[in-house]
Amino acid sequence: MIEGIFIASITLITSFVITFKAVPSIIDIAGMKNLCDKPDGIRKLHKNIVPTLGGIAMFAGFLISYGILSGQYTPHYFSPLVASLLILFFLGVKDDILVLCSKKKLAGQIIAAGIIVFVGGIKVPGLDGLFSITNFPAYAGELFSIFAIIIIINAYNLIDGVDGLAGMVSLTGALIFGVWFLAGGHYAEAILCFSLVGALGGFLHHNFEPAKIFMGDTGSQLIGFVMAVAGFRLMELNATTTVFMLDAPAVFVFSVMIIPMFDTIRVIIIRLYRGVSPLKADSRHLHHSMLRLGLRHSSIALTLSCFNLIIVASGLYFGSGNVYIYFIALIGMAASYFAHNKIDGDTKL
């Protein structure tokens, strides 16, 4: 346990320092090459022109620390994981610089997800009996896992709408996963999560209001993919752990990701109801509504991160006895908060 804590701590610090030190150089280069995001007063509500390549620093901090320090705890899925992340990295960089069409981006995400699922063997084992699914039959689990990875990647992408929000919510989730893995002695996954925590911490120093740089698709796709892998591994390893064994690991994983997941699902439903493409960007996300309430970017990021923690803790306390009660409790808490923040007709069904 002490060895695991030490390695996880060193991983976090290394990732933090690399990301923290890399960001200023990327800001300078992006400024010289005019690789910046310009406000439009509609969806892009920042006041100044801001560089968009922060994900490159995050990727460097994460992959270098994880690759070097995993050592004897290198997991069996390390190579497929790195291959998938490289695909997403190049997709993200191209999209941040030139703007990639949604179909090509989706195709790349499917390939990356397919590699980690079919080659790496990382998949959702079941849904704890929710919807009568305890274990997936052959190939159904793989297909569901690919679909889930794509949804998670894009959920973290879509929540990246105000300074510090995606970083704070992701840091909260990765820290929860990391502590669970560390307590259970699953050090390979703990190192994976703490590498992400360090990269997020180093990036957030430059991204918190007022942001000096954005993570872009390069960063959000890294976050979503690593969170998906960590979540799937938690579901798989729960049966073998003796500390913090969960009655409903799949629902617990959903609770950790509930802010970006619920917001994305909600917005997609609204778009489909209005006859609009679910891929079409708009200003119906929760953070847009909170901005219209007059909240600052930092307040939104901190509020939603704290609410995420409350949902995770409350769900574990009140709903652990029955998977349906657990799931409904999570949905109810999220829906009540989202409904409370619907302040204009544009967000209503």
Image: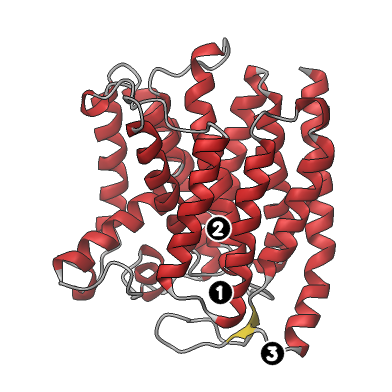
Q: Say which residue appears at 45% left-offset and 75% top-offset.
A: 101
Question: Of marks 2 and 1, which one's residue comes earlier in the chain?
Answer: 1
Mark 3 packing: few (<14 Cα in 10 Å), some, or many (20+)? Answer: some
> Which label was assigned to residue 34?
3
Quadrant in which the N terminus appears: top right
Left or right position of 82 against 340: right
Mark 1 packing: few (<14 Cα in 10 Å), some, or many (20+)? Answer: some
Picture quadrant of residue 258: top left
Q: Secondary structure at mark 3?
A: loop
Instruction: Please state which amino acid type lies under the numbered disc 2.
Output: Gln
- Spatial CA distance of label 2 from label 1 is 11 Å
The residue indicated by pointer 1 is: 95
Question: Of marks 3 and 1, which one's residue comes earlier in the chain?
Answer: 3
x, y (%) of residue 228? 50, 42
Q: Say which residue appears at 61% left-offset and 58% top-offset.
A: 87
Instruction: Please state which amino acid type lies under the numbered disc 3.
Output: Asn
